[in-house]
Each structure stands twice: as C-alpha cells, then as structure tokens.
Image (spheres, rainbow, N blue to C red):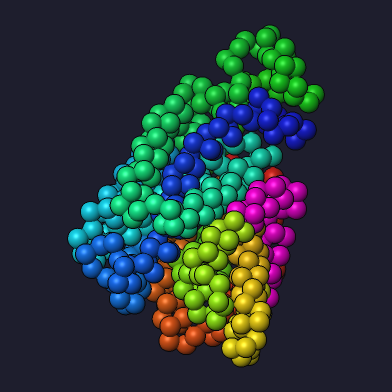
Amino acid sequence: MSNSKELSIWSKRYRRQILVTIVAHIITFTHGISLGWLSPIIQLLQSPESPLSFTITTDQVSWIGSLFGIGFLVGNIFFGLTLDRLGRKLNMYLMALPHMLFWILSYTAQNINYLYAGRFFAGFTSSGMYVIIPIFISELSDKEIRGALTAMAMGFLSTGILLGYALPAYLDYFLVPCIIIVLPILYFLACLAFPETPQYLLKRGHTKRAEKSFNFYKGLPELEESSQQKYNRDLELPRPTLPASSEFEELKAAVLSGGLATPIMIKDFFTKSAMFKFFTAFIVCILNQFSSSFVFVSYMSAIFASSGSAMDPNECTIYMGVVEIAGTVTSTVLVERFGRKVLLLSSTAGMAASMFAFGIFVQFTDDATKAQYDWAPLVLMALVVYTAAFGIVGLTYTIIVEILPAKIRGQAQAISMVFMSICVFGALHLYPMFLYNYGLPITMYSCTGVCVVCGIYLIIFLEETKGKSMEHD
C-alpha cells in the first residue's frame, strides 16, 4: 500500500475515512446518552418523586442492568450470524431500530417490564456497535490512522455519557426521548451515502464494486494511470508511491492469497494460533468488564452516595463524564505514538492503584475525616475513570479486532463479543450486590485484583498490533 505515514491527518487521503468514522459514531454517541441518562434516572425512579406511575426496587435495578447484558449477548449472536451474510453496511443500518425502541419504551413505560425491554434493546444496539463498527472502520482505514479512528469510538461514547448525565438536571424525563430519538434517524440517513467495505466486496467476488469502494475511501479518483502521477502530487503523497490501481491490486492479492475469500471451516477456529488469540481476547474482555470500567457508568451516582462524601452525587457524576472524555481523547492522540500495549498496561496499573486507594479511604477514615476531605472521593474516582478511559475503555475493542485471525475476524469478533456480553451480564448483576451487601471497599479491592491478574497475563502474552495489516495475521 502507499506509504502515507508522512501525510497530515487532514489530507485528502484520509478525509473520507474520518468523515465516515464520524457518521458511524453518531449511533455510538446516542448510545452513550442512553447509558449516562440512566444513571441519575435510576436514582430518581427509586424515589417518591419518580416521574413514572411506579417506583423501582434495588432488585429491579439489578435486573435493569442485567438485561442490558442479555440484549448484548443476543445481539452478538445475531450480528455474528449476519456480519458476512448481509455485509457490514446493512448491519450498520440495523443498529438504528433497537436503539429507537429503547427511547420509545422509556417514554411509554407503564410498568417495570417496559424498562426491562428497553434495556434489552439498548444492549442489542451496543453489541452491533462493538461488532460491526470496529470491523467496518478497520477495513476502510489506512493502517497509519486505524488505531486513532477505532479509538475515537470511546470519545463519542464518553461525550454521549456526559450529556446523558447532565440531561436529567435540565430536561423533563419525557422530553429527553423525544429529542434524542432524532439522532438514530439521522444516523440511518447519513449511512446511505457510503459504500460497503472493499474487503467484504472482494470476499464476495464483486471486484469492480470493491475497486470503486476502495477509491472512495482512499480519496482516489478513477483516473487513467497517466493521470495518476499528477493526482498523487496534488495529494502530496510521498515518493515513491503506487498508483491507485496498484494499491487496489495489492489489497486484492492480500485478500485472495491470505485465504480470506475461501470458505470458512470449523477447523479455522481451532488452530493453535486461533485458540491462543481467542484466549487473549477473552482476558481483555474480563479486564474490561470486571475491572468495572463499564459498570461505573451505570452506578456512578450510587458509588458517590456510598463514599461518605457530602458532595452532590449527581453533580460528581457529571464531573466524571468530563474526565472520561479527557481520557478517551488521550487514547486517540497517543495510540499511534506509543502503541496499544503500553497504553493498555499503563491504564490497568493506574486503575488498580486508584481503586485500591479509593477502598482504603472509604474503609479506614472516620466520618470527621470524610467530612474534612469530602473532595477525596471525587479526586480518586477521577483517577479511576481517567486511567480506565485511556486504555481499558479506549483500546479494548481496537486490540480485540487487531489480534484476531484475519480469515475469521468477523466471526471471531462476534464470538469475543458473546463472551464480553456474558461478562457484561455478570458484572452488571454482581456489582450492585457487592456494593449494597459488602460495601464499597470490598467492591474496589475485588476490581483491583482483576486488574492485577489480567495485567500480569497481558504483560507476558499480549502482542503489539500497531501498524499491523488487517489482511494478514
């Protein structure tokens, strides 16, 4: 492929790749709003001031969280089966509908079952977001910016979460769904403008369409070879460079020679290399969920309420949204400079130390000390959220996509996300039980232990995937 390492991120070569990434993440941003909005809303629905005709119990809160995991599991199975049958783009369209159903059910809720169903559909959307979008973006992007583009997902998600945290403070419960439901409609319409990925089209034998798609995403016109040199100069591509046709032929050869266009067999999933990569991906999934980097989003207000701080829990939650955005921006900026492994391990170590310190503060300080240093839980949680965001949150899905075998990447990603969904269900179901039955310190120490064990494995066995070709293992 062209050596585009010297190009500016805003060069013509990359503009469409960035634009498509932004459009794809409209659904990520909207999903983030739904996650953040639910955290303060759960507290509200448990109170006598509930805007609905009913209030919810702690056990029902646990099931609201758990049904997200079940929806995530079902969605992963669904998208795993349809990823190569229907293609990346059609599956991108399909994510809009269940997300719309979440907001419709939240608005029309007459009893707890509406909220259960809404969270199920939110989980279903989330599965598509983590199976389809990473593969879609990794296939259309140049390797020099692939890490930054895939890491952008968590920036959009975190921004959405922050907005979701803030909305209940300013808007009525029933007004929010009416406003936000416009976004998945906008996402669906915007996706109509973009073609299927060239890799998928090559696998299906649609060579002409694949070449047009390749030229579209690389910002290359369909010119004769004699005109290509002038265009490359206009793009300020470094010399020597390949003409567009040669770039595409190289991609085509990589897809065909790598066996990516041949039928997938069961034995492809059980080679020694594939099994090792699956196991490593599963360890990354365990770290992502049982470190509680995701669970904090749903129970942030409850954590601050349990910390003994006199600060307003909902106000602290909004601050955490800002911190998480800062962390994901850090991930996007640094991922191509330092690589995936360094950032992930730094994040794991930082999160473990911060959670351990949080547990120590809550367990071993008296009420007077907590009152004197009521800012401490906010600072400690900010460290937890920031360190989680720039690695464990920001890079998990980038790393999983890149380490999985090229031939079975779509199916392997879906399998990994099925395992992730089991972890999501377990974490969301167990976390409130730990928090309410064993207290915040034990919960924090348990999550610290997960970080330490998984971190040791990843230090030894995780490969660096910076600059790795997506057509070769």
Q: Is residue 405 visible?
A: no
Image quadrant assignment for residue 84:
top left
Q: Is residue 81 left or right of residue 258?
A: left
Q: Residue at x 51, y 26 (%)?
A: 213
Please identify the residue farthest to the left as the structure is shown: 110
Q: Is residue 149 left or right of residue 171?
A: right
Q: Residue at x 61, y 12 (%)?
A: 223
In terms of depth relative to the viewer, which is nearer, 399 or 40?
A: 40
Residue 165: x and y in percent read: 47, 58
| Vertical placement of residue 349 versus 96, above or below | below
**How many labels sit on residues?**
0
**Does 337 lie within the magenta span?**
yes
Q: Residue at x 55, y 32 (%)?
A: 19
Magenta residues: mostly which secondary structure?
A: helix
In terms of depth relative to the viewer, which is nearer, 346 or 231?
A: 346
Q: Residue at x 54, y 38 (%)?
A: 21
| Vertical placement of residue 254 versus 443, above or below | above
Q: Is residue 88 visible?
A: yes
In terms of depth relative to the viewer, which is nearer, 25 or 195?
A: 25
Residue 78: x and y in percent read: 33, 52
The quarter of the picture where the N terminus appears is top right
- Span colored in magenta: 325-353
Residue 173: x and y in percent read: 33, 55
**Does 247 lie within the magenta span?**
no
